Image (tube, helix red, strand yellow):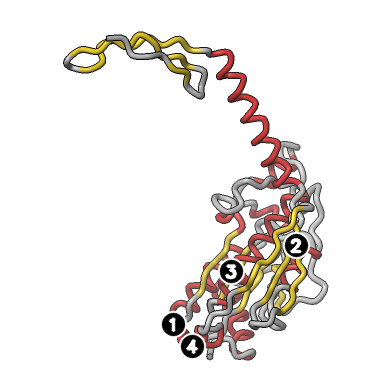
């Protein structure tokens, strides 16, 4: 018995399938490899073009208005394309309820400074000290975030801006959950840090500036990045051939004490003292 031939969507013609009592015993295929390969390459090219466009020129603007039901109606523009009729669904459990449960107030501690200035060291000391006091924290480390959420971004200026925007939005969610979020990122550009501040309620963005001299950071060079940058193997490295814009008005400044850098516990204590004074460690 000969089965009828048919064409697959991949350009494969199936013919002469002989049947026995046990089923198919022989299947002859004639593949149109040139046609299938051409079609697949065209699909890949279109997808690559689409993803490249989304990545390099994403721009979001939003217009927000209240509708009659009290929900927030939002229109979002992404690179000229608009998503309309987006409704913010308000839940009966609000930030204040979560803060009451946790006995703390959600906020964002944004630790900024040069590579090697001690940002991650402070973040870890801070989260440990707060954890020991029964406070819920989460650290958003710049390198760690690039392993997942921001793994598609480079270190070019536009990608750096997108990197900070995403971290800022995630930090905002943690803060809204009542968590003390500790973001440890170089964030070299002032306008990007200010943009993150602008999306949070007044007072909930606490900027911590690791004001350490470049020579100290470069002498530490824990990742060997300054050495690579000086050798010309890394381009656009903050502090070497790309600028760092220090905060003009930040809440906390961590500096050397004379020629000595303060130990992590001392730096963490300074930040915790600020949180206590502002009432963030109680509901």
| Above/below status of 74 relative to 274 | above
Give the image location of residue 204, x and y in percent.
66, 80
Q: CA distance from mark 4 to mark 1?
A: 9 Å
For label 2, the residue is 213
Instruction: Give the left or right position of residue 206, taking residue 32 as reference.
Output: right
Give yes or no for contact between labels 4 and 1 (Cβ–Cβ under 8 Å).
Answer: yes
Give yes or no for contact between labels 4 and 3 (Cβ–Cβ under 8 Å).
Answer: no
| Above/below status of 186 relative to 202 | above
Q: Quadrant of the N terminus?
A: top left
**Mark 3 element type:** helix
Please identify the quarter of the rendering in which residue 247 is found.
Answer: bottom right
Give the residue drawn at x 57%, y 19%. Answer: 37
Circle 1 crowding by C-alpha within 10 Å: few under 14, some 14–19, many from 20: few
Pair 3/1: label in front? 1
Pair 4/3: label in front? 4
Pair 4/2: label in front? 4
* Depth check, front residue: 272 or 77: 77
For label 1, the residue is 134
Disc nearer the start of the sequence (4/1) = 4
Q: CA distance from mark 4 to mark 2?
A: 38 Å
**Mark 1 element type:** loop
For label 3, the residue is 122
For label 4, the residue is 103
Give the image location of residue 176, x and y in percent.
58, 77
Give the residue drawn at x 70%, y 83%. Answer: 203
Instruction: Give the left or right position of residue 115, taking residue 173 as reference.
Output: right
Q: CA distance from mark 4 to mark 3?
A: 23 Å
Q: CA distance from mark 3 to mark 1?
A: 18 Å
Disc nearer the start of the sequence (2/3) = 3
| Above/below status of 60 relative to 18 | below
Please identify the quarter of the rendering in which residue 220 is found.
Answer: bottom right
Disc nearer the start of the sequence (1/2) = 1
């Amino acid at each position: 018995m000969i089965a009828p031939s048919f064409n697959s969507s991949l350009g494969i013609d199936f013919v002469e399938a002989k049947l026995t009592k046990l089923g198919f015993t022989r299947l002859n295929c004639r593949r149109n490899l040139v046609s299938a390969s051409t079609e697949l390459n065209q699909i890949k090219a279109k997808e690559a073009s689409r993803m490249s466009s989304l990545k390099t020129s994403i721009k979001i603007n939003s217009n927000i208005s209240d509708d009659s039901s009290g929900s927030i109606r939002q229109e979002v523009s992404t690179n000229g394309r608009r998503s309309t009729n987006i409704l913010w669904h308000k839940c009966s459990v609000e930030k204040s309820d979560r803060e009451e449960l946790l006995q703390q107030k959600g906020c964002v501690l944004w630790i900024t400074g040069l590579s090697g200035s001690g940002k991650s060291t402070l973040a870890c000391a801070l989260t440990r000290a707060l954890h020991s006091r029964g406070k819920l924290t989460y650290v958003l480390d710049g390198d760690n975030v690039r392993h997942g959420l921001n793994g598609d971004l480079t270190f070019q200026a536009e990608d750096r801006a997108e990197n900070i925007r995403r971290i800022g939005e995630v930090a905002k969610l943690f803060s809204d959950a009542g968590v003390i979020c500790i973001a440890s990122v170089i964030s070299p550009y002032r306008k990007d840090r200010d943009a993150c501040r602008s999306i949070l309620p007044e007072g909930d963005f606490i900027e911590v500036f690791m004001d350490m001299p470049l020579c100290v950071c470069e002498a530490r060079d824990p990742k060997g990045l300054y050495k690579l940058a000086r050798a010309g193997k890394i381009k656009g490295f903050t502090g070497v051939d790309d600028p760092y814009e220090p905060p003009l008005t930040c809440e906390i400044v961590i500096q050397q004490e004379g020629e000595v850098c303060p130990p992590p516990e001392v730096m963490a204590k300074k930040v915790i003292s600020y949180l206590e004074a502002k009432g963030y460690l109680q509901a």
